[in-house]
Image (cartoon, rainbow, N blue to C red):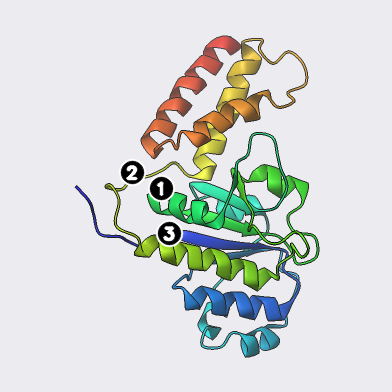
Amino acid sequence: MTTPAVAPPVRIVLVRPRNPENLGAVARAMKNFGLSDWAVVSLGTHDFATARRVAVHAEDLLDRPRLSATLDEAVADCAWVVGTSSRRVRGKRRLTPDEVAEGARERGGRTALVFGEERSGLDNEAVERCHDLSVIPTDAAQPSLNLAQAVIVYAYALRRALAAPAGPAPRPVAATDAELARVEEALRVALRGGGFLAGPERHAVKDLAATLRRARLSRREARLWLAALARLGRALGR
């Protein structure tokens, strides 16, 4: 049985944007393709007059972005956090915009698409914070895109995914990033209590937690994992 296509819940997250023209152009690109949920982490400009001149017919979006102090805060209620970066990072997939759009449509929770600041993109900490990475396959002679250009590529891919034939019924409501972070911390406590983490942690816990993120746990499954690991951690701590 299939269900009618519905717009996937997607949040555009801008980290430290500095250029007011880019803010206005991103708002316009979002409006072009029916997106309205966005967050700005550590806003680097307050020149909203300039931004409004560029945000043709999308000025209303400039009045209501989520202003967040940290990336954690901006994505806490999201089930899937995808950073836009050309880097290759151990344990993280590198997806095309079309693959991101299809994944967002299939998931049972909100997807965050994270874009770095104009000059240097996402820093190492932000890249590590994301569940997966995505890159636009540009020409090697000129790989860099303007921030608003990058946003519009993903917005168009999301629009195309929505127009495709409807797939199976939606999955159960996915666990949020904050819920998965609590599972990861409970796993860390249990592994340390059991002696698996006898020295520096390195990548062990993050690699194990990454398998749970790839499994796309539902909220119910995440609560079950959290309860089991918390009980195990308490038993090992006695």
Q: Is residue 197 above or below residue 141?
A: above
Reading the image, the residue beneath label 2 is: 171
Question: x%, y% of residue 204?
Answer: 67, 23
Q: Please report contact status of discs 1 and 2: CB closer than 8 Å, yes or no.
A: yes
Per the image, the residue denoted by label 1 is: 107
Q: Is residue 195 left or right of residue 212?
A: right
The residue at 80%/65% (across/down) is: 119
Where residue 94 appears, as percent x and y from the top left, is: 62, 45
How many neighbours does mark 1 have within 10 angstroms: few (below 14), some (14-19), or many (20 or more)? many
The residue that appears at 63% across and 58% down in the rendered structure is 136
Amino acid found under the numbered disc labelled 1 = Arg
> What is the C-alpha distance between the residues marked 3 and 2?
14 Å
In whole angstroms, how far apart are the C-alphas of marks 1 and 3? 9 Å
| Disc number placed over residue 9 in the picture, else none | 3
* Residue at disc 1, secondary structure: loop
Amino acid type, residue under disc 2 in the picture = Arg
Asked whether disc 3 touches disc 2, contact meaning CB atoms under 8 Å apart, the reply is no
Q: Earlier in the sequence, mark 3 or mark 2?
A: 3
Secondary element at image label 2? loop
- Marks 1/2: CA distance? 6 Å
Residue drawn at the location 59% of the way across and 67% of the way down: 151
| Pointers 1 and 3 in contact (C-beta within 8 Å) | no
Q: Nearer the viewer, residue 208 or 136?
A: 136
Report the amino acid beneath label 3. Pro
User: 148 or 69, which is in the foreground?
Assistant: 148
**Looking at the rendering, which quadrant does residue 59 occupy?**
bottom right
SS at mark 3? loop
Where is residue 182 shown, x and y percent of the image?
54, 34
In this orientation, does residue 7 appear? no
Tell me if mark 2 has few (under 14), some (14-19) or many (20+) residues whose alpha carbon lies within 10 angstroms of its own: few
